[in-house]
Amino acid sequence: MAQKKLFQPYDLGPLHLSNRTVMAPLTRSRATSDGVPKDIHVEYYRQRVGAGLIISEATNITVEGRGYAWTPGIFSDEQVTAWKKVTDAVHEEGGKIVLQLWHVGRISHPDLQPGGQAPVAPSAVKPEGKAFTEAGFKDHETPRALEEAELPRVVADYVKATRNARAAGFDGVEVHSANGYLLDQFLRDGTNTRTDRYGGSIENRMRFPLEVLDAVIAAWDKEHVGVRISPVTVMGGSSESDQQTLFNAYVEELNKRKPLYLHVIEGQTGGDRDKDGFDYRALRERFDGPYMGNNGYDAKLAIEQVESGEVDLACFGKLFISNPDLVTRLEIGAPLNDWNKDTFYGGDEKGYTDYPSLTAEERARYAQAA
């Protein structure tokens, strides 16, 4: 039986991937209070090198960009040194890993901000819900609207983070422009009520995210920079009056810049893939480069989507949490470990590096039966 395309090698720009599966960026909240990855991060990522590509957990580009307790950063020398241990381990096992650049914008809390300041955002629109702080969950507070004169400073934070990621040995970076965080907040008219050249029309609302992307590409190059979007996933009550028109236009602009890939969350993250009846094929048609699909993928859907050409790469999230050898299990039809939601965020090795991989005998048995 011919090997399915999902499990065949794939050249993603300059990166030669062993297969077309991708480990999604997964926030696990296990770094130090200063955002430094630990030795357990090294083991966690090393265990999952069976993925064709690993996208790191969302990583703060600056203290101001932090929105959750114990998440890692890429803005200090200590963080860079710690991440270098992770990338070395992944590369020693033949894997590829890119770092996701993250600024949460308004989805934060003063407890997580430098000097207890208010979180920053495009506009002073208070999010719904609660922030995850070291003292527990606390109600979000109204953010401070960024002044236009401050925006170059934020762009510079992305540039520094990109250079730090390169110094840490990552194979590229992913600009996080999704899930209701800072760049997505600029895009949406529910969170961007500005009246300057960064607000109002779709063209204006796209301006800042595109300035960030242009700066990140200039700091590395287009062959090492991917972009993540989530047309219908909202967080903290963010909204957009015309999602299809906005994201069609945004992808057209992204396509002009020829990034390494377009990473699309199809539907509501962790939920309905058909939410709002959004036409993802319209995005696919507007993007000439590699298209990565994410949300609700299992072996059947991933194989179908890759074989049909609907996606070039299939991204898996929670399945990689509980199955470090996920790709092997999918290919030979072995049963999957169940995940433990109670250990998703925070803690130690439990629910992080202690999920079992198949033994050699188990692999042989399931492969023979496949």
Image (cartoon, grey):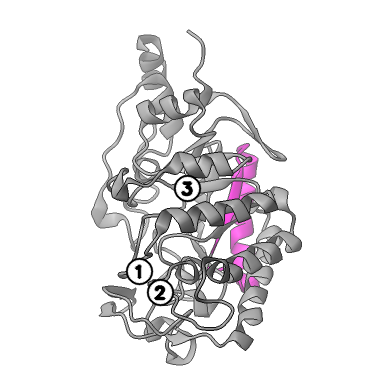
Camera-side residue of 313 and 283: 283
Find residue 44 and report its horizontal and vertical position in percent.
46, 49
Q: Position of residue 23 (x, y in %)?
A: 47, 43
Is 169 placed left or right of 52 in the picture?
Answer: right
Q: Badges 3 and 1: C-beta atoms under 8 Å apart?
A: no
Left or right relative to 159: residue 297: left
Label 3, label 2: how many angstroms apart (C-alpha)? 21 Å
| The residue stretch that appears in magenta | 73-101
Whole-angstrom CA distance, mark 3 to mark 1, is 18 Å
Mark number, residue 342:
none
Q: Which residue type carries mark 3?
A: Val
Gap in Å between the C-alphas at discs 2 and 1? Answer: 6 Å
* Closest to the observer, 312 or 1: 312
**Eye-nearest disc, 3 or 2:** 2
Query: Which residue in the structure is indicated by mark 1?
Result: 238
The amino acid beneath tag 2 is: Thr
Q: Which residue is mark 2?
A: 191
Q: For mark 3, what is the residue? A: 264
Q: Is residue 182 above or below residue 328?
A: below
Residue visible at 48% across and 42% down in the picture: 282
